[in-house]
Amino acid sequence: MVDFTGGTWRSLIDGSEVSAIPDPWPESYLQDDWEDNKLQDRDGQDTTTHNGVEGVYRPEWNVSGDAEANNDELIVTGGDEVETEISLNLDETITWEFKDLSLEGDRFFIPLFSETAQTSSNRVENGYSFRLISGNTGIVSHDSDGSTDGIVTSDLPDELDDVEITRQPNGEWELIIEGTSEGTGTDTEHDNPQHAVFTSFSDTTGTISDYIVS
């Protein structure tokens, strides 16, 4: 028998590498690596069940603005909004992992979850984000008018290789940067996860290469 689980898959048409599901890919609520360089009509899209919730690998993203997937990254520029649905079991510990974040400009919001897809002044409403901004990076809560309150913030650079955020069932959040904890904070104001929304300010370009919620 031939083992097809390893190696590289290539197109029979032009010999180019075919972007496929990682083997294995971890069970998660939501995961994207943008290695198909698409935001819609995804290659290798798949679903799984994680903590009783259907999870999606390479979801369909709704785009407002000129956001794109290129060079295995999501690029959010100049007030773009990139949104998809997310469903989480808040009775379980949840972990968000981000890879290769960069910022040129003012600020870039990477989604944790929000109750609506609405935005105010390029910020989501009624939810939580990881805010990348020089000198005030961290976990923030968004109110109904889009204003933000810091839960855990730190003076960090605007390029980060590895970010991990955890939320405990009691609403305690922890921010871990490059393997080091930057602190904890508790916030339970928002408890109806429905959407994941990437946003950026009008003079900002933000990039990310991996987004995993598990």
Image (cartoon, rainbow, N blue to C red):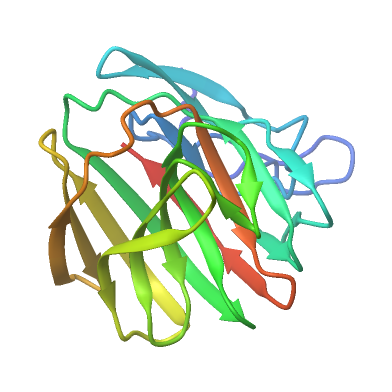
Task: Name the foreground residue: 24 vs 60.
Answer: 60
**Residue 106 rendering spot, x and y as whole percentages:** 60, 80
Q: Is residue 100 left or right of residue 123?
A: left
Snapshot quadrant of residue 77 = bottom right
Which residue is at the far top? 52
Front-lying residue, 6 or 36: 36
In this picture, is 87 found above or below 161?
above
- Dividing the picture into quadrants, the one containing residue 155 is bottom left
Task: Please say whether residue 143 is visible from this viewpoint.
Answer: yes
**Place of residue 94 in the rendered image (x, y in percent of width and height, measured from the top left):** 24, 38
Quarter that holds the C terminus = top left
Residue at image coords 79%, 47%:
64
Work out which residue is located at the far right of the displayed protein and give it. Answer: 13
Quarter of the view holding residue 28: top left
- Where residue 13 sits in the image (x, y, percent)? 89, 37
Q: Residue at x 48, y 29 (%)?
A: 86
Left or right of residue 55: residue 40: right
What residue is at 44 percent from the left and 48 percent from the top? Answer: 143
Tell me the residue at 22%/39% (across/down).
Answer: 188
- Seen in the picture, residue 31 relative to 187 is either above or below; the reply is above
Left or right side of 10 for 195: left
Q: Would you place residue 187 above or below residue 88 in this image? A: below
State the image coordinates of residue 36 (x, y, percent, origin top left): 69, 45
Q: Is residue 71 visible?
A: no
